[in-house]
Image (cartoon, helix red, strand yellow):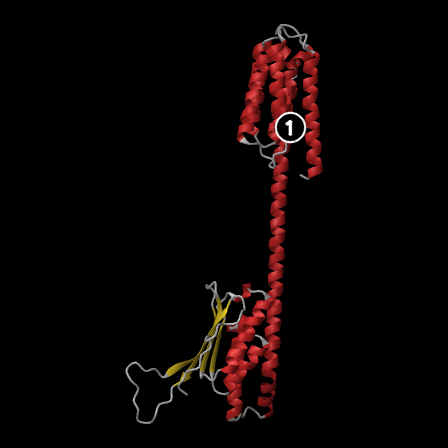
Amino acid sequence: MTPAPRYALVILAALFSAYHLLRAALTLETPRDVVPVLIAMLVYAVASVLSLWPMGTTRMPSWLASINLATAIIVPLLVTSQLDPTRNNGYATWHVASIGTLMTITVVRQREAVAYIGIVFLTVQSLLWAGPGLALGMGVTGSLIWVILASVLTRSIAGAQHDAERLTQAEHATSDWQAAQYAHVHERRRRLSQTGRLATPMLRTIIANGGRLSVADRMECRTLEASLRDEIRGRHLLSDPVRSEVLAARRRGAIVNMLDEGGLEELDAGVLDAVHEQIAEALAASQATRLIVRSVPDDERVAVTVVGLRAVHREPGVAPGPDDDDEELDVWLEIPRDGSRAGVGAVGVSDED
C-alpha cells in the first residue's frame, strides 16, 4: 500500500472515531450517571489514538491489541450500566458502532483473532443486555458485518501482495537467468575468439606443410595447447601482459601452471589489474624451470602466490645427499589482496647459480 492511500484511510478512520465520540457527547443527558460514560469515552479515545498512530509497522503490537480487546469489553459494560435496556436509547448506544470501528481497525492492522473476540463479546453482551430486537436496532449487525468485510478485504490484499512479491521474485530470477545465459554466451564467444587468434596461424602452417612439422613447430604446438588450457584453468589470472610472459617462459623451456582456484572475481578491476601487473613482472624476472601461479580463495590477505623452482645442477660424480632435492626455490611471491606491492624479499633469487 502506497503512503498516500494509507494516510487517507487513517484520516477516514480518525474521522469515524471522532464522530462516535461526538454522538456520545450529544447524548450525555440520557445515561443515569455520566461519569462511567465519560470514562468509557476516554478509554475509547485513547485506544483509537494509539491504534491510528504511525508506528512504522502495519501489524499491531501485542500490547496494543490487548488494550483494544480490553476496550471492547470495558466500554460496553460501562455504557450499558447507565442505560435502560427496555427502551430505545438512540445515539446513547454509541459504543456499538465505536467498538465496531475499533475492531475494524484492529483487523486491518493484522490482529484478526483479537478483533473477532472483541466483536463477538460486543454481540453477545448486547443480546443479553437488550434482547435480539433492541440489539439489532443498536447496530450490532452492522458492526459485525464491518469486521467481517475488513477481514475478507485484508486477507485478499495480503494474498495479492504475496502474489505480487512472488511475481517480482520470479521476474528477478528470470532476469538473473538471462544475464547468466548472456554471460555464458559472451564467455564462449570470447574463448572461441581467443582460441582462433592463438591457433589459426599454426593451423595454417600445418595445412601448408601437409601435416609435416619440424621440431620447432611441434614445440610451438605444445606451447599453444598449454596457452589454450590456461584460458580454462587460469581465467582470472590472465591479462595480455601475463599471457605474453607465460608464453615467453614456455618458449625458453619452462613449465608454467596457471591455476585459478577462485577469489579473484571478487576484486575490483583496478586491484585486479595491479595483481596482473605483479604476476607479469614476477614471470619476466624469473629464470625458473617450473612456475606455479595460483589464486588463494580463502585468505583475507593474499590473493595470488607465484612460486618458481629451478633445477639443481651438480658437479659430475657428486651424489645428492639424503635431504637434497632436484629443485630449489627461485621465486616466492605473495601478492596482497588489495593489489599493493609485495614487501622487500618477497621475490627471492637463490645464492647458488
Q: Name the residue at the front extreme.
A: 344
Residue sitting nearer the eye, 137 or 228: 228
Please say if 301 is above or below 313.
above
Quadrant of res 117:
top right
On the question of residue 116 being in view, the answer is: no
The image shows residue 251 at horizontal and vertical percentages of: 51, 87
Quarter of the image with the N terminus in it = top right
Give SS at disc 1.
helix
- Total labels: the figure holds 1
On the question of residue 278 being in view, the answer is: yes
Quarter of the image with the C terminus in it = bottom left
Please say if 123 is above or below 52.
above
Residue sitting nearer the eye, 58 or 164: 58
How packed is label 1: few (under 14 Cα within 10 Å), some, or many (20 or more)? some
Quadrant of res 129:
top right
User: Which residue is found at the position 64% from the left and 10% from the top?
Assistant: 134
The image shows residue 5 at horizontal and vertical percentages of: 70, 36
Per the image, the residue denoted by label 1 is: 149
Q: In the image, what residue type sits under mark 1?
A: Leu
User: Which residue is found at the position 58% from the left and 75% from the top?
Assistant: 239
Q: Name the residue at the left extreme.
A: 322
User: Which residue is found at the position 48% from the left and 82% from the top?
Assistant: 286
The image shows residue 31 at horizontal and vertical percentages of: 64, 8
Please say if 297 is above or below 253.
above
Residue sitting nearer the eye, 64 or 324: 324
The image shows residue 246 at horizontal and vertical percentages of: 53, 80
